[in-house]
């Protein structure tokens, strides 16, 4: 650990379940990357500073103050300190001033980036806005849609360096809840949904008739009981129905637009393939570390 | 307990969570009604007979065999003994022969009614078919739709004394899962969804744009965070969105048809009001004990 003296600042993505951070040295080089499972969901406000020190204390020079810039749920009302949402349309970073978090250790100066909010329809994001800023750092003139699939999939219209509007779909969370807790769990496979044919057929059904979603979902159970639907095919069908219905609801975001998908490799492939099956086009973001890029971009902005 | 000698037979509705039974005496009169929480979900096959005896042994005459006729999940593959599904179109009772369950007590002769199944689209029911038979016992010429809301809402086309087709929607189970486990749980009220205005607005939204369901559901959370949406209104919105989307998918079942709703008083009122808001008409079943009526009707059929 000879690295500590070279830390200029620390970038951190502090989500509900995880904390990831990068130590940035001279010239903007990352010389250490760390992560822990001490996400915002398990921490009271006064537990954030100790959790940060547990992960990064050896990276702090003793003789000066190290800036720490954080994005994500650490800025929620139940987090370290609330960083009020900036309202769209606005730039994804810099739409609102970072908020100084209370600290006791004299070596720390911690700021948290605000999330974004929208009214009519009401929506919020925390963390994704920094990934969007990271994407725009490489494609400043992007005019299209970013799709960030996950527990809560974000569909984000971006142009002129600004987030214009966005919507969140609960697809990932509903998939997990139905798979873990509903009557369908008896019919599913725990370890995969690799049946592409079953996925494609269900995708088309979910897209063509989203109103029937609640019935098509139940139908997985009798198809398994009566027709021997295999667990992997059942899981693929569940995924396909939900993503198909989501893509029907999100058509204004992806049809006839430049669409970039930002997510895990598996979900990114799945969403791109789904849009292509339904007549759209989409591509994956080139840079896998968009949160870090966004934090770097935000660090360069004039301090609010 | 002077009743035992008068038992002609016992009718039982044995669901996943509960067992209800009625002792029937001379002239078809019910002289005892019992229930327990020993549902099929918690019983291994050899535990059904002891559970039945715990609830009903004092109702059995000592000197002869008492027939017991059961409907519901006791006839599932994981139940007492599997009573294979009868395939629609068929009468709701009598479409398949009751199955004799294995018993050790010489006073018992137990038969379980089959459920109904459908292929293309695949669907199943167990227990509801007996409620339908009970309804037809009073309205033999009914030509219309029965709606049985609950954890899994059944929409059932009935004419000429037969079940023609049916679909199951997961509305109730999804409502419960989202309310108990999802991010929305922070915004909801545990004890009610009495905000009729919020329900009606969400019903219209869910019905008009079912494709946007996954986004409208998430929107409850930011509406609570940003706009102070009250917990009771949030819960009503969740219910309205889900029922509105369900009614969009079930239009062929309820539009321009005679619709009878069979369920708890609260759900029955809610579904009738919802269909009326959306331009349909519906009425509640007059007889609150449809399972019992259906078991009585099935008991009169020639033994298969």
Image (cartoon, coloured by chain):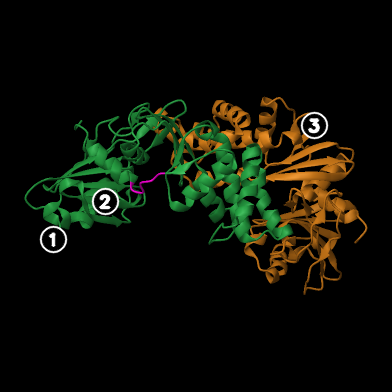
Chain colours: A green, B orange
Task: Tell me which residue sits at (31%, 54%) in the image.
Answer: A38
Q: Is B187 drawn above or below residue B37 in the view shown?
A: above
The percent position of residue B299, horizontal first and vertical second, equals 87, 56
The percent position of residue A276, horizontal first and vertical second, equals 56, 42
Left/right of residue B191 with respect to residue B250 in the rendered view: left
Displayed quadrant of residue B162: top right
Task: Tell me which residue sits at (43%, 47%) in the image.
Answer: A263
Q: Is residue B175 visible?
A: no
Q: Residues within 10 Å of mark 3 (few under 14, many from 20)?
A: some
Left/right of residue A299 with respect to residue B34 in the rendered view: left
**Could you tell me which secondary element the residue under label 2 belongs to?**
strand
Task: Tell me which residue sits at (83%, 41%) in the image.
Answer: B158
Host chain of mark 1: A
Q: In front here: B207 or B275?
A: B207
Host chain of mark 3: B
Give the labeled residue for mark 1.
A2
Q: Residue furthest right?
A: B302
Task: Tell me the distance, in whole angstroms, between the alpha carbons under discs 2 and 1.
Answer: 18 Å
Overall secondary structure of the magenta section: loop
- Tell me if residue A281 is in the magenta stretch: no
The percent position of residue A42, horizontal first and vertical second, equals 33, 52
Earlier in the chain: of badge 2 and badge 1, it is 1
Displayed quadrant of residue B143: top right
The tag on residue A21 is 2
**Magenta part of the chain:** A285-289
Host chain of mark 2: A
Q: In front here: A124 or B189?
A: A124
The percent position of residue B228, horizontal first and vertical second, equals 41, 29
Give the labeled residue for mark 3.
B257
């Amino acid at each position: 650990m000879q690295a500590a003296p070279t830390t200029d600042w620390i970038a951190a993505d502090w989500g509900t379940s995880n904390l990831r951070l990068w130590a940035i040295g001279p010239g903007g080089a990352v010389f250490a990357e760390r992560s822990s499972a001490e996400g915002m969901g398990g921490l009271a406000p006064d537990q954030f500073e100790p959790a940060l020190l547990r992960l990064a204390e050896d990276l702090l020079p003793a003789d000066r103050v190290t800036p720490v810039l954080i994005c994500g749920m650490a800025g929620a009302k139940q987090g370290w300190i609330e960083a009020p949402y900036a309202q769209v349309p606005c730039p994804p970073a810099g739409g609102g001033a970072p908020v100084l978090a209370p600290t006791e250790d004299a070596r720390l100066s911690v700021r948290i980036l605000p999330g974004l909010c929208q009214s009519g329809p009401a929506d919020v994001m925390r963390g994704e806005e920094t990934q969007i800023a990271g994407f725009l750092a490489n494609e400043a003139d992007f005019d299209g849609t970013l799709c960030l699939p996950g527990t809560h999939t974000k569909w984000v219209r971006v142009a002129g360096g600004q987030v214009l509007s966005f919507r969140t779909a609960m697809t990932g969370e509903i998939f997990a809840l139905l798979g873990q807790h509903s009557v369908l769990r008896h019919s599913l496979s725990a370890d995969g949904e690799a049946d592409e044919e079953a996925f494609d057929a269900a995708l088309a059904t979910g897209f063509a008739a989203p109103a029937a979603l609640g019935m098509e979902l139940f139908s997985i159970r009798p198809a398994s009981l009566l027709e021997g639907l295999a667990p992997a095919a059942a899981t693929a069908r569940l995924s396909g129905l939900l993503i198909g219905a989501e893509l029907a609801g999100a058509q204004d975001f992806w049809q006839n637009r430049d669409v970039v998908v930002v997510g895990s490799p598996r979900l990114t492939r799945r969403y791109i393939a789904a849009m292509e099956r339904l007549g759209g086009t989409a591509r994956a973001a080139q840079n896998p570390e968009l949160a870090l890029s966004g934090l770097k971009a935000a660090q360069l902005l004039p301090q609010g």
